Image: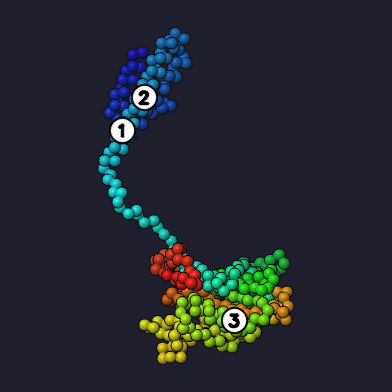
Amino acid sequence: MADVEQLQQDYLAQIASADLAGLEEIRIAALGKQGAISGLLKTLGQMSAEERQEQGPRINGAREAVTAAITTRKDALEGAALNARLAAEAIDLTLPPAASAQGSVHPVSQVMDELAEIFADLGFAVATGPEIESGWYNFTALNMPETHPARAMHDTFYFPDRNAQGEEMLLRTHTSPVQIRTMMAQKPPIRIIAPGRTYRSDSDATHTPMFHQVEGLVIDKGITMAHLKWTLETFVKAFFERDDIVLRLRPSYFPFTEPSAEVDVGFTVEKGKRVIGGDPTGPNGGWMEILGSGMVNRKVIEHCGLDPDVWQGFAFGCGIDRLAMLKYGMDDLRAFFDGDLRWLKHYGFSSLDVPTLSGGVGA
Ligand code: 2NL
């Protein structure tokens, strides 16, 4: 059995000059399932006891010698590779770290945060509710019965199936159902804003099928239109960060408010751009409609289970996307929802930018 020693010698010679890939090939050839030394180990089972006594240590010795040689050679090669890398790679610890990718806050989210902050300082809580609503919460409770023309005007997205109560289901066309739900669930006094996504089957340069709205609601005793006007004036001045802003209330009609008023805000043209504020009656001035509002219709208060002879209030509604465009000078509504990261990089906000009434409301 001189060939066991010969085999061992051959392998040790190969191992001494092999690279890492070669080592693996040698390991498989010698010690793998079909390997030469593994094959010799299998023959021990067919030998007589004396023969096994003699061959066993030789074959096992070869196995151990080859295994140890592979391990030693592998450690040496890996150590050398590491040393070569350490020598080649110079690390300059004085360099600044590579900047990590950072996201930014979408203008709509920023404006929602600003609204929440401003109205929080005025004592309003933020209320939210479902985007899938029944016709009752979206229309009927708001004094828009089945045949009401305003119901057709809302270009509503309806679902093909009705709910378990047999009611027609739809995507809310405004956030008013949130106020209805709040009035039905809480005892007055109520002071809330309801910001969120709303849907109308409408699509052109100034309308997207999904848009954002904020509505406000106050229900208390002895609330008048004066409270409404002061609240809106205070909000608009805080939001646009100017004191010289004037409001104009024009009589209007909404089924859910009586009386109703459309609210215009004074603007002036500065460097060819319309900015909120300044003298709307001057040569560069004018009025721009930004809000709808009114005293909550007593029928709506009754629908929510409250006594309109005890509780009164005001409400208003306004488009968040438009507020963002006016404040931050963006001119194409569709870009808001394209998901173009270059647009977001240009118009987005730092997540550390926390708006407050006292500290200003944004970058
Ligand atoms: C607009 C007009 C408005 C309301 C929304 C409201 C909600 C309840 C009761 C009464 Cl629960 N009113 N909301 C009131 C007046 C106007 O929105 O032009 N929005 C974009």
Q: Is residue 298 left or right of residue 37?
A: right
Q: Nearer the viewer, residue 360 or 278?
A: 360
Q: Residue furthest top?
A: 50
Q: Marks 1 and 3, Cα distance to the nearest angstrom?
A: 81 Å
What label does residue 68 carry, if any? 2
Locate residue 139: give its quadrant: bottom right
Q: Which residue is mark 1?
A: 77
Q: Earlier in the sequence, mark 2 or mark 3?
A: 2
Front residue of this view, candidates 107 and 208 = 107
Residue beneath label 3, please? 228
In the displayed structure image, the side of residue 304 where residue 101 appears, left or right: left
Residue at position x 33%, y 16% in the image: 5
Rounded to the nearest angstrom, the CA distance separating label 2 from label 3 is 88 Å
Residue type at mark 1 is Leu
Q: Identify the residue at horizontal 57%, vertical 77% (top origin).
A: 317
User: In terms of depth relative to the viewer, which is nearer, 273 or 266?
Assistant: 266
Q: Position of residue 359 (x, y in %)?
A: 46, 70
Residue 255 x/y as whole percent:
64, 82
Q: Tell me residue 345's x, y (percent).
A: 40, 66
